[in-house]
Amino acid sequence: MPLTLRLALRDWDYMTPLVLGDVSSPKLDIKVDRVGTLVGHVGRSDAYDAAEMSFSRYTQLRIDGDRTVVGIPNFIMRGFRHRCVITRKDSPVTRLADLKGKRIGVTGWRDSGNTWTRAALRREGVGVEDAFWYAGRLTGAHPVTDRLDGFGRPGRIEAMPGERPMVEALADGWLDAIFTPFMPDGYFGGTAPFRQVLPDFRAAEASYFAAVGYVPGMHLVGIKADIVAEHPWVIAELSDLIDQSQRLWLQKRRKYADTTPWMLDELLKSAAGLPEGWDASGFAVNRHMIADFATELHEQGILPRLMSPEELFDFDSDGSAIARTAANN
């Protein structure tokens, strides 16, 4: 009888084959719930056994000694971040280096994506101490929440004054740039007065990939440690199903490319610009990226000490799984 696994995921298109049952396993009966907001702590969830989770918040669990969640190095959300820095269309800022000394808005200080974006700026000589940071909601439609998450520092990292929406502050020039994973309403229709800081962000991202050798991972899959303790095989089985779903979706995307007029061009460029396996799952193949992320978290003051990839994941350096976490619960 297969093990039932209740899995919470964002609505990624490449999970469609998994949701519809086009990929399946005789060992797992996966019940996928598509969620708009990530599960706060899957280890304490009554609704889910596994979930997509922030890479940054997962590292916080590990350094806090919370072993109720086992991380699977299947980075379900990956992406370059150069495109996520926007400014006004009339701004003189056209390079990441131009943001030194400027006011920058962020949608959340500890967010994995914003950590990677700051990493991109740091490569261009703009560290945390070289700018003035304001955490807040992107638009008035977004909720007022604590986006500093305990990392505020007066005069350097603060909340947006009066909880003012950041797009308003960017439009009138109070902010010089915003980090955002999702573009504001009207952006794609050309009515918004904003643009990416980098005129050719794709070229910048290609150069970044050539330098580091990976596409940054923002979200991974976390599973309850007690399930792993009882069924050690579940990590590899679940990860393989997610990989199968992504591969099948890509095959179908390449066949049914007419969802937008230039999708085929994008698919061809991506295939030519990135090596096969750029999105591979597993510890060994992602160890360098994991180590770089841990370094950034430490350098940016989010983690109090540098953690090794082996501390973050229950895998040996050669990529073989070990039962360290599950056995200690």
Image: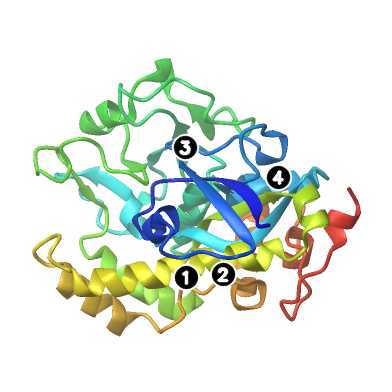
Q: CA distance from mark 4 to mark 3?
A: 22 Å
Vertical arrangement, residue 190 with respect to residue 74, above or below: above
Marks 2 and 4 sit apart, C-alpha to C-alpha, by 26 Å
Does label 4 or label 3 sit earlier along the sequence? Answer: 4
C-alpha separation, residue under disc 2 versus residue under disc 1: 6 Å
Q: Which residue is the site of mark 2? A: 240
Label 3 – label 2 distance at C-alpha: 40 Å
Within-10-Å neighbours for mark 1: few <14, some 14–19, many 20+: some
Q: Earlier in the sequence, mark 1 or mark 3?
A: 3
Q: Earlier in the sequence, mark 4 or mark 1?
A: 4
Q: Is residue 215 above or below residue 195?
A: below
Quarter of the figure with the N terminus: bottom right
Give the label, 4 or 3, closer to the camera: 4
**Image position of 190 (left or right of 103):** left
Q: Secondary structure at mark 3?
A: strand
Residue 60 — which label?
4
Q: Residues within 10 Å of mark 4 (few under 14, many from 20)?
A: some
**Three-letter amino acid code of the residue under disc 3:** Trp
Q: Earlier in the sequence, mark 3 or mark 2?
A: 3
Q: Residue at x 45, y 38 (%)?
A: 35
Q: Tell me the element at label 4.
A: helix
The kind of residue tagged 4 is Gln
Type of residue at label 2?
Asp
State if disc 1 and disc 2 touch (CB < 8 Å): yes
Three-letter amino acid code at disc 1?
Gln
